[in-house]
Image (cartoon, coloured by chain):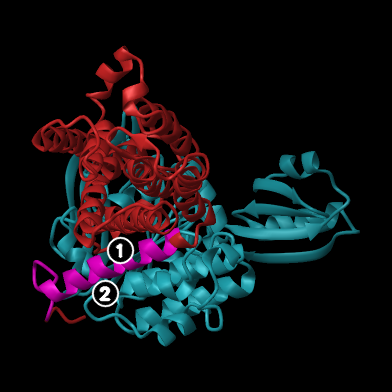
Chain colours: A cyan, B red
Amino acid sequence: MASAVADWGVKTRPAGSAAVAELEGVSKSYGQTRALSGVNLTVRAGELVALLGPNGAGKTTAVKLMLGLLPPDAGKVRVFGQDPTQPANRVRTGTMLQVGRAPETLRVREHIDLFSSYYPAPMPMDAVLAAAGLTGLEDRLFADLSGGQRQRVLFALAICGNPDLLFLDEPTAGLDVEARRMVWEQVRRLLGQGKSVLLTTHYLEEADALADRIVVIHKGGIIAEGTAEEIKARTTGRKMRFRSALTLADLQRMPGVTSVREDRDAFELTTAAPESVARELLLRDTTLSGLEITSAGLEEAFLSLTRKD
Amino acid sequence: MSTAAMTPMGFSRAQVARIYWKEAKYELLKMSRMKTYALSVLGFPVMFYVLFGLLLNSREQALGGTTVPSYLIASYGTFGVMGTSLFGTAAALASERGLGWLQLKRASPMPPAAYFAAKVAMSMVFSALVVTLLMTLGVVFGGVHLTPLIAIKLLAILVAGSLPFAALGLGVGYFAGPNSATGVINLIYLPISFCSGLWVPYMFLPKFLRQFAHVLPSYHLSQLGLSLFGAGQQEPAATHWEVLLAFTLICLGLARIGFQRDKGKSYG
């Protein structure tokens, strides 16, 4: 897989930004399955790194290695300069994993109280409840919470210890739009306090919204790294959206069209030459309507990056 | 980001003690609120004792060197502490493993030993509870003569003796899946209870079963309890304790293997 790890020219951080978590040349296999291959990943102080990739890409394995839950087969894992398999440094980290369920017969505040006790200087209970949007729910049993509320409890457990480094594994999975925005707001607030975050997600919008740096992972290797803008710039071209009487086949045959797909009643088309494609479309279809031309989104960049493999 | 006050080793003694205390407290709360656990581990021994010890036999009827109600406190007491320990540890552990909850705990600063200590402590509290219930019923309704000293000794023996079964529960919890753990426990619990003479008293078991009973920790624990009433086989106490200790160590070893094995695994 070494050939798949392209050198995308990582943007260097200002000197003095210490690495709080790093994977250096890390490989990990489960039996015959190679989960990570020669991965280099660094989270620096005060930044949010989004680890972006489809399911099975190795995101969760990378997080588990950084949490010290697994040892690497090769390479080094360092969190705050130490080996994370030693529990001592965990007082500085908080974690949100995709767990099926927490113990159902404990109340929200009991869960938070217990996790807070693991840390030397935890946040006050009221502050945790407010930050996680759980005020008023503290006496509810975990069993009596909705899916979104349960996610928020897990988020509360990650932040309650006032950690310097947060690991958030798909933190907004299953949340509605309002809850997702609330989590984003809280994460931004934590970044404002100087904390560092490693976030895994497959929501491109989330990576775009939160990340200082995006690391794209695919089949166990890093295939791209940079700011959202840099990654979008890797994909040349524009996205065009419109309604047309032309067929998909017609559009695919047009010169200059990189890709085209149907999206409900409209077409979405990517091209490196939007002006000539637009001219062609308007000539051939006088009923064309709803034409929008935008820069290629992160999704296109992501798809084209992962398609190269 | 201050690096002050973060010693390499992390916790002060006071904080560690607090973690162990809270872990145990919440484990107890958690299990008490689980009606399936609380009602059955307390209810079944009490029910059997009331039926066989109080209702179906007269209080003076002799059994193995003492009266029936006295004898059955020791044997159902053993049965009771086995149940509290086996079900208290195995099922919760298996389900918390399977759901990834244990991984979250391991990723936290919690010392792993606190988690297991809490489960054992919780099962010891419930064990004490079930023994106290049986003793109370026996004294009030069964004419059992219990001096405070014997009561304390019985409580201490049975609660200490629940540790091997807590260890067994941890071992099973590490190897069974979340849905099968309770089933596996039942497959172990009921037959070895029977073969130890906790249902049909030991003296009435057929010979080959009586021989087999000697490898069972439950047999040894019940004998220790019975000896307080002057009943039982009058074997030396040291033998019983040795078997219980050996059994505990084997189960802890098993649990540790399961713990290490989990480290290499990925759940979901």
| Mark drawn on residue B202 | none
Q: Please, is residue B199 above or below residue A170 in the view? A: above
Q: Does the magenta stretch mainly form a helix, a strand or a loop? A: helix
Q: Determine which quarter of the picture holds residue A226.
A: bottom left
Number of numbered discs on residues: 2
Determine whether, in the image, residue B219 is placed left or right of residue B250. Answer: right
Q: Secondary structure at mark 1?
A: helix
Question: Where residue A286 sits: x, y (%)?
Answer: 90, 58
Which quarter shows the N terminus of chain A? top left
Residue A304 lies in the magenta stretch: no
Q: Do badges 2 and 1 share one subunit?
A: no
Report the front residue among B178 and A256.
B178
Q: Is residue A9 visible?
A: no
- Amino acid beneath label 2: Asp
Question: Where residue A118 sits: x, y (%)?
Answer: 26, 70
Residue at coordinates 40% horizontally, 34% vertically from top-left? B176
Residue at mark 2: A164
The segment highlighted magenta reads B5-31
